[in-house]
Image: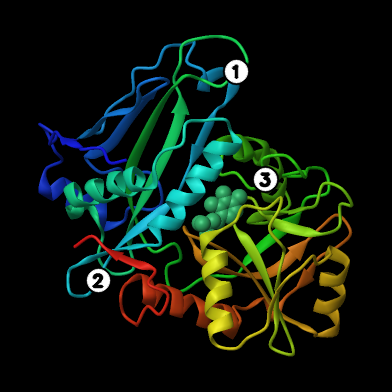
Amino acid sequence: MSLKFEIRTAANPTAEKDRAAKLENPGFGRVFSDHMAIVRYRQGEGWHSARIESRANFPLDPAGAVLHYAQEIFEGLKAYKRDDGGVNLFRPDANAKRFQSSAERMAMALLPEDVFIEAVEQLVRIDRAWIPGGEGSLYLRPFMIASEVFLGVKPSAEYIFSVIASPVGSYFKGGPAPVSIWVSENYTRAAIGGTGAVKCGGNYAASLRAQAEAIDHGCDQVVFLDAVERRYIEELGGMNIFFVFEDGSLITPPLGTILPGITRDSIIALLRDSGTVVREEPYTIDQWRKDAASGRLKEAFACGTAAVISPIGKVCSASGDFVISGGAAGPVAMGLRKTLVDIQYGRTNDPHNWIRKVF
Ligand SMILES: *Cc1c(COP(=O)(O)O)cnc(C)c1O
């Protein structure tokens, strides 16, 4: 299926000097571009009214299904400016596929992959001037909400798919600073058969209390344990996790209840390209503590689109803290980060064909 997007250029776009001021130091997720993509769905009619238009409020009835039953999913990817002035997207097809599997689990309408990619590309084209240079990028947020007006528990018959864009600076100024993480023993993120593998807002709502607990304990991020035995490491609130061992091998928790990160998948592929052993297998918090103490564990890092790779310097829990790689960023995390970022910005070759050039 293919939909033709009607392009309605914003009547009052941001003045060039105001945009330049905003791009100076955009931070993360607070500055937005001038346009958005929007596509609507109605049962029986399918996807229709595909448009690029001025970024504006949605009219949403107070009985709109998303407001009561939380049928909502989202994605996150970035557009990167190359040195030659062109623009890259990184694996947008993987985001489109994951968006479909999220929709399926949440009993929402399936958006064709080509419509997802077209919406993202059209938005990047029209708001190209919003892509920061240097280590910045344009963060793209595709999402879908249930918009049918009713109170009652059943899948909505109407949906709004939209994409918005937010210029973001380099996540870490002056290189990634190691993060400290808090092991959540009071809360879990996902159970088998639940929505752990789905990129839905509800998972985040449920994680905020645990994240607040991490902050209360002086940590940057929370790490969740499995919901059954409460000892296997799953992932952070919004990032997957890897462990690096003395013998050069790595472990990352297996898919199932964790979010299947595209960064995680890319890192596994890059490691295997270089002949490095990566095992997708369960790893317990007790083992982590032991391996950090014995020196068998050399590094741990978290990964996701927003921050790419965050080295983990310290782990805190109710039963005590421990430090990893002396609290500093390790060479494996930093090397992988450089390779990934170089691919994303088109500075090195792209053996897996991950880059899609918009310009
Ligand atoms: C989005 C997300 C990730 C990272 O996925 P990427 O595709 O690498 O950005 C990890 N965990 C959770 C819970 C997420 O929502």
Residue 338 at what x, y percent from top left? 45, 79
Instruction: Name the amino acid type tagged 2.
Output: Arg
> Residue 201 falls in which quadrant of the image?
top right
Is 118 displayed left or right of 325 in the figure? left
Residue marked by disc 1: 154
Question: Could you tell me which residue is drawn at 33 percent across and 49 percent down?
Answer: 117
Tell me which numbered mark, 3 or 1, is placed earlier along the sequence.
1
Tell me which numbered mark, 1 or 2, is placed earlier along the sequence.
2
Instruction: Quadrant for the N terminus, please.
Output: top left
Vertical placement of residue 141 versus 145, above or below:
below
Instruction: Name the amino acid type tagged 1.
Output: Lys
Vertical placement of residue 341 versus 53, above or below:
below
Q: Looking at the image, which is closer to me, 256 or 32?
A: 256
Q: What secondary structure is marked by label 1?
A: loop
Q: CA distance from mark 1 to mark 2?
A: 46 Å
Question: Could you tell me which residue is drawn at 59 percent across and 57 percent down?
Answer: 239
Does the beta carbon of the residue at mark 3 sit less than 8 Å from ligand 1?
yes
Tell me which numbered mark, 2 or 3, is placed earlier along the sequence.
2
